[in-house]
Every structure is written in C-alpha cells, then in structure tokens.
Image (cartoon, helix red, strand yellow):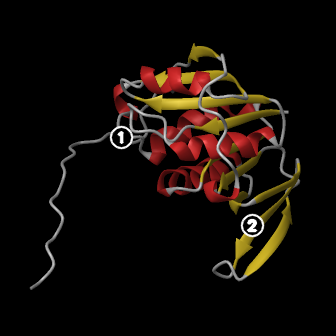
Amino acid sequence: MSILVIAEHDNAVLKAATLNTVTAAAQLGSDITVLVAGHGCGAVAEAAAQVTGVTKVLIADAPHYAHQLAENVAALVVGLASGYSHILAPATAAGKNTLPRVAALLDVAQISDVIKVVNADTFVRPIYAGNVLATVQSTDPIKVMTVRGTAFPAAAATGGSASIETVAPPPTLVCPVLSASNSPSPTAPN
C-alpha cells in the first residue's frame, strides 16, 4: 500500500507533528510519500527526505502555496490521490482544514483524530469529547484521515534518504491570497 502524508511546515521547518504522522503511516505500509506544498520550502523537503521510513518526497513549490490555503492544497492532493491507498495529515488546524475538503472532492469519508491503527481499514478514534473510543472501519478505496500526534511516537528525523521529486501544481488556482498581514494580539483589560 502506498501512503501519502501531507507535511506540516512553515515553509522553513518541518513540524514535529509530521514525524508522528509518519509513524502512523508506517503502521499501514512501507511505501510512504511525504507531500511538501509551500513556497521557498526546499529546506522542508530536504528535512522530510531525512525522516526514517519515508521513501519519497514530493515538493510543490509555488507562490500560491505560500500560505498553504486548504482550497489550494486540497486541489493538489486530489490530483495526486489516485496513486495512494491512504492520505494522512496531522490532526492540526491545517490538517483538519484540508483533509475534509480532500475527502469531499474524492467522495470518501474522512476519519478524524486517529489514535490507533488496527489494520489497513480499521482505526480507533475518540468521540464524545474523548469520553468514548470508537473503532471505525472504512471500505472506501482511499482512506483519508487526520492523525492525533500525541498518540504516536515521532519517527526519527534523521537516518532516511528518500528521493525528492517536483510535482507541478494544478493548472488553475482555486483561491488566491489577496493580502496578508499580522494583526497585533489584543491586550487584556486592566
């Protein structure tokens, strides 16, 4: 089985949650590809190629991925999806924003907050604010899921030697960023 892991990063550094997601992916199979979508993110792709267990890194480096908007990343992932049995992302704000869109576009269910891999189509996830653990099974041809990082140990950040391949972005941009700015945090009242 081929597994696609969507890397969590800030265009400069590979986030630790990606390492936990790679460990979950390794429980599904040994053919693990990491997708790095961003702008000026070559260092992230290099770091992902060093992660133990990763066999290939795909890099989509384009200005419209600079902010990693879910609409744009989802379109990219859907274009790549046919070669994979599982698509995973960390259960972070970015992963929880992107993967439901991917699942909807693929017309499959999305499984959230996986904390245990039972087998290739059966997973454990918390429900009811974590008070109940549900074992769920998916018969979809592509399993799309977010992985709770605290449930899996981090894969070693070094020791791997995956190949890096460039992927072309989709021909049309789904959602352009018109402007971006940092807003100051509100101060607490005295």
Task: Characterize the local packing of mark 2: few (<14), some (14-19) or many (20 or more) Cα atoms within 10 angstroms.
Answer: many
Q: Secondary structure at mark 1?
A: loop
Q: Residues within 10 Å of mark 1 (few under 14, many from 20)?
A: some
Quadrant of the frame with the C terminus: bottom left
Question: In the rendered image, is residue 36 in sight?
Answer: yes
Residue 169 visible in image: no
**Of marks 1 and 2, which one's residue comes earlier in the chain?**
1
Q: CA distance from mark 1 to mark 2?
A: 29 Å
Residue marked by disc 1: 67
Depicted 170 relative to depicted 116: above or below: above
Q: State the residue in front, 110 or 164.
A: 164
> Disc 1 residue type?
His
The residue where tag 2 is placed is 125
Give the residue at x 51% y 55%: 97
Q: Residue placed at 55% from the left, 19% from the top?
A: 167
Tell me residue 169's x, y (percent). Answer: 49, 24
Q: Which quadrant of the structure image shows residue 184? A: bottom left
Residue 134, relative to residue 1: is it above or below? Answer: below
In this rendering, which labeled residue sits more in front, label 1 or label 2? Answer: 2
* Residue at far bottom of view: 190
Residue lying at 62% horizontally and 54% vertically, measured from the top left: 149
72 to 58, vertically: above or below: below
Which residue is situated farthest in the left direction here? 190
